[in-house]
Image (spheres, rainbow, N blue to C red):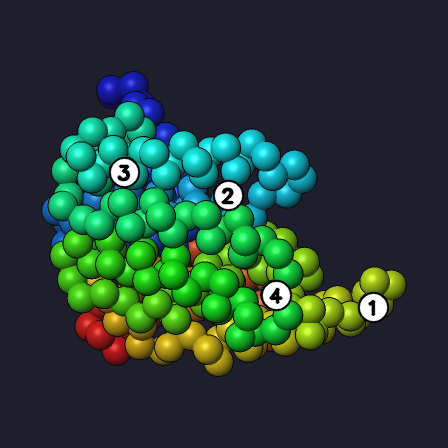
Amino acid sequence: MAAPTALDSFLDKWRGRWPEWAVAEVFVPAPQRERAVAWFALLQEFDDILNIAGDPLPADAKLGWWGTELRDWAGRRSRHPLGRLLEPVPAPWAALADALPDLVAARARPADGAGAFAALAAYAQAVAEVEAAVLEGPAAAPRALIAQVLATRLAEAGVDAVPQSSQPRADDTAGRENAQRAWAGELLDAWPARPGGPLPRRVWSALARRRLQPFAAGRLPQPGRQPLRILWRAWRAAAGG
């Protein structure tokens, strides 16, 4: 067996966070699967930068590095292992690089739900346009992309991701839990049930939405459990439903 490569480590890190994909990817054409995972792994890098805990300076420096890297991809030059699969694709990489600084601003607690979506609007539009080229399909609805990013942020940051308008008192434990559930419900309401986009995005969006639903109901998600339900949701998403 060949030793894992640097590229493998990034792909496997994403798969480790999304064990449902091992079941759902059967609906993604085999030639498209590796590139889809590479693209999602890149977006995970950006999610991690958005959701950094503690000193943000190293993450901000990494974000600046990614801006340079993506602009180099536009010129068919790459250094990061993910570039092996993504850089050859003609896509508006420079526009995505220009939108990355919005992730720094989006760490600030928004005043309300509308502010949370507005903070990521330009970033989501850039992601949708690059993704349409990378995954060879129509662009996804930016609102669906934002909802998925904010759902990931809620899972990572907890009550700190909840808008100011819904923040409980600092000493109110039950209020903190209720605020997180309410924000999860608001994200579900704002998340288009049919997000559009290329087939792999539709499948991933369905998986991410499925994770958020128990959170909104006060239960912990159990990724990878109930494979028949995963198959059903993935099939519906792949079929456009």
Q: Position of residue 216 (x, y in %)?
A: 58, 73
Q: Amino acid at mark 2?
A: Ile
The answer to which image quadrant residue 79 occupies is top left
Let me know if residue 222 appears in the view.
Answer: no
The residue at which mark 2 appears reads as 49
Q: Is residue 208 left or right of residue 215?
A: left
Q: Residue at x 50, y 43 (%)?
A: 49
Q: CA distance from mark 1 to mark 4?
A: 17 Å
| First reached walking from the N terminus: tag 3 or tag 2 | 2
Q: Does residue 115 lie above or below 14 as drawn?
A: below
| First reached walking from the N terminus: tag 3 or tag 4 | 3
Of residue 21 and residue 76, the one placed in the foreground of this image is 76
The residue at which mark 3 appears reads as 71
Q: Position of residue 183 (x, y in %)?
A: 60, 72
Contact between marks 1 and 4 (CB within 8 A): the answer is: no
Contact between marks 3 and 1 (CB within 8 A): the answer is: no
The residue at which mark 1 appears reads as 169
Q: CA distance from mark 4 to mark 2?
A: 17 Å
Q: Amino acid at mark 1?
A: Arg
Q: Residue at x 24, y 53 (%)?
A: 130
Let me know if residue 154 appears in the view.
Answer: yes
